[in-house]
Amino acid sequence: MMYIKDPMEIERKSFEIIESEWKQNPKSYEEAQIMKRIIHTTGDFEYGDLLRMGEDGIEKGLAALKPGFKIYSDTKMIQSGINKANLKVLQGKMYNATHDEDVAIQAKKEGRTRSMVGIEKAVKNEDIQIFVIGNAPTALFHLLDLLEERKQSPALIIGVPVGFVGAEESKEALMNSPHPYLAVKGRKGGSPVAAAMVNALMKIKVQEAAHGGE
Amino acid sequence: MMYIKDPMEIERKSFEIIESEWKQNPKSYEEAQIMKRIIHTTGDFEYGDLLRMGEDGIEKGLAALKPGFKIYSDTKMIQSGINKANLKVLQGKMYNATHDEDVAIQAKKEGRTRSMVGIEKAVKNEDIQIFVIGNAPTALFHLLDLLEERKQSPALIIGVPVGFVGAEESKEALMNSPHPYLAVKGRKGGSPVAAAMVNALMKIKVQEAAHGGE
């Protein structure tokens, strides 16, 4: 069968199609990059309308991508979806505790989700600049509670839990919080959306560095 | 903040909400399970209308989940999303070659996607019952070509590549092929959708076994 086989050409053409069809008017180059990458990942233009970014979400997120930065994700699926080449260039690390054995045991004992216990472990023991919650509303709710208790604020929270129980409410709570954020309104979201947002930020940062902007 | 923390309760309530809101009329218990799990994973009811299953896709797929079965996925993200407990109960294995070093080297040399070269390696060297393509149209196109060349047919192909260049066309090619399939029409799809389909099939199989249905 005949089809385009070159990955660079596939990506270039995809972004061209998105730009030719979308009806959104992003307010900045950065917002456009994030929006396009989510639409590219999901095949779903509705994300253009659902994307929300706090006043300083993009700015704070980009500033945090300094050598040695650490990103916490609530799923391994997000880690799988991260652009490893750009992560390496920027000298950052991904971290996830949801599947740690001690976390699984504690979660079962307490009747809570592993996502909740995992994020608790990360907040208490690690220096995390960006939290990325792509799956579990419980992780996002609990993160907001923990940060309030501890009077902490990370550089950025990316909150895009998906689903029918608590997802929408957890994102509303994030948007009403004092923290810099990127989010998606409503029920939609998920790990690929979360990974797309991180990848878009990293790509902007790598391009800035290449053009001597940093 | 107040929210539901028990994972079993979250899942039960999610499926209850989906059933109370959906407008689709699945033709069988199995189709309903697959449809609900995709909607649960994506927060997107449109998947109910986009789901396509060949005449014998579900039947052949379920029959293939015998001890020792092997599933090939084109992304690690799919592997991350698979229900490990049920995979273990059913004594199956996931396999992916997209990120193998030899695959990366060959892909770069030949200007093809790693997904294409990876699936070629799998078809030639492994005994795979179910192929799951959640990301790369090139992998699905190439799989169909390879199977035709080799006059082979797997038990099931799950084809849900996402995106703007070739995704829709690759799924049309699958639906017009002689192979048993599960697919999603149009541009939407992706690794979580693919994982949801595999998870739904595995859950049905585990339930059948528990009720002595085998």
Image: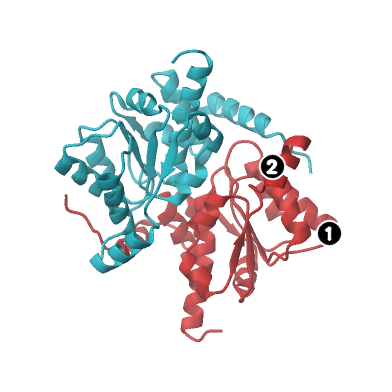
Chain colours: A cyan, B red
Q: Chain of mark 2?
A: B
Q: Secondary structure at mark 2?
A: helix
- Residue at the outermost top position: A212
Q: Is there any visible trace of residue B11 in the rendered image?
A: no
Above or below, comparing residue A113 to residue B44 in the picture = below
Where residue B4 appears, x then y in whole percent?
23, 58
Q: Earlier in the sequence, mark 1 or mark 2?
A: 2
Nearest the eye: B1 or B91? B91
Q: Quadrant of the C terminus of chain B?
A: bottom right
Task: Say which residue appears at 50% left-offset and 64% top-offset.
Answer: B199
Q: Which residue is mark 2?
A: B104
Where residue B147 appears, x then y in whole percent?
78, 57
Q: Are marks 1 and 2 on the same chain?
A: yes
The image quadrant of residue A13 is: top right
Above or below, comparing residue A89 to residue B113 in the picture = above
Q: Report, in whole angstroms, how far the alpha carbon at label 1 lies from the one at label 2.
A: 24 Å
Task: Say which residue appears at 72% left-offset and 54% top-offset.
Answer: B176
Between tags 1 and 2, which lies in front?
2
Taking B148 as reference, is A207 left or right?
A: left
Taking B171 as reference, is A28 left or right?
A: left
| Amino acid type at image mark 2 | Ala
Taking A119 as reference, is A95 left or right?
A: right
The image quadrant of residue B152 is: bottom right
| Amino acid type at image mark 1 | Arg
Q: Secondary structure at mark 1?
A: helix
The number of numbered badges drawn on the structure is 2
Taking A145 as reference, is B211 left or right?
A: right
Q: Which residue is mark 1?
A: B150
